[in-house]
Image (cartoon, rainbow, N blue to C red):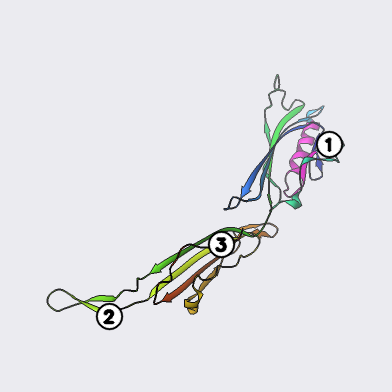
Amino acid sequence: MIFKYGSYAHEQAEVGVRAEYTSIFDTFRRRMGEKIRFTIIGVKRADTQAALITKLNALFTAYMEDYKDFGLYLDDGVTPTNMVVSNAATFGGVKVVVPPSMINGPWSGRPEFANQKTYYFVLEAETRVGEGIYAWKQRLVVKGTGGPKWRYSPRQVGDPQVQTLQTNTSFWYIQTGANIGRKDYYPAEAPLFPSIEHGEMREVGYDSAREIRYPGEAELFGTDWKYFMEATVSQGFTSFLLPTL
């Protein structure tokens, strides 16, 4: 097997590969992608120290740049295995999170830098699948009971006196909520009781994307809302309708 990063190809069987794939889920526990982490340990060999240094310099140069395809290929160096990651298929691109770093290998006599050098590096990437809604929540506050409105009236001498200002009052319903869309803004929920909404008091807000990646990818767009509704009789409430997933 041959490991390649962009146009740079390691020698055959030069490296050992540990590939880790960790699933990413939204708040509804639906799969929305993977975190990919490749840890590579290899040994550069050469007949002379000068030739070894030349090979190591080429290694360092190859991994100074991000956003490259990488993975294991068959011995012909052309046919990909199932352990190849395409930069174009990732969210935010391939990253060299740990550039080639030198370590001592477990070799008898430790001939490091005599004619070989052990190294390791780490590559990471993320993928995304699906679209639609990522997160959702709502809350309803019921203010008032419809009962009388009263206040204590101050007196110059003695305790304040209770005064009834209204024999009946209104019910207020304050509905708040928020959602997060994957690829774009997701519509705000409608008022629970639209016929009694104070339309002039409605509030709808939009947040910029929570995840913005070079060279221009973005997702997780937030929308929030607040509705004020008023009535002279109780409207009742049982539960919210869950979003369509």
Residue drawn at x 47%, y 77% is 196
Judge the density around disc 3: few (<14), some (14-19), many (≥20) Cα neighbours within 10 Å: many
Residue at the spot of label 3: 179
Q: Between disc 1 and disc 3, whose residue precedes?
A: 1
Mark 2 or 3 closer to N-term? 2
Q: Which mark is residue 116?
A: none
Left of 95 or right of it: where is 163?
Answer: left
Eye-nearest disc, 2 or 1: 2
Residue 32 position in % (x across, y down): 65, 51
Q: Which residue is mark 1?
A: 74
Circle nearer the viewer, 1 or 3: 3
The boundaries of the magenta stretch are: 50-72
Residue 115 x %, y %: 77, 26
Task: Specify the quadrant that holds the C terminus.
Answer: bottom right
Q: Quadrant of residue 132?
A: bottom right
In this rendering, position of residue 200 left or right of residue 109: left
Q: Residue furthest right?
A: 76
Label 1 sits on what residue type?
Answer: Leu
Q: What SS does tag 1 mark?
A: loop
Q: Secondary structure at mark 2?
A: strand
Q: From mark 2 to mark 3, how far is it between C-alphas?
A: 41 Å
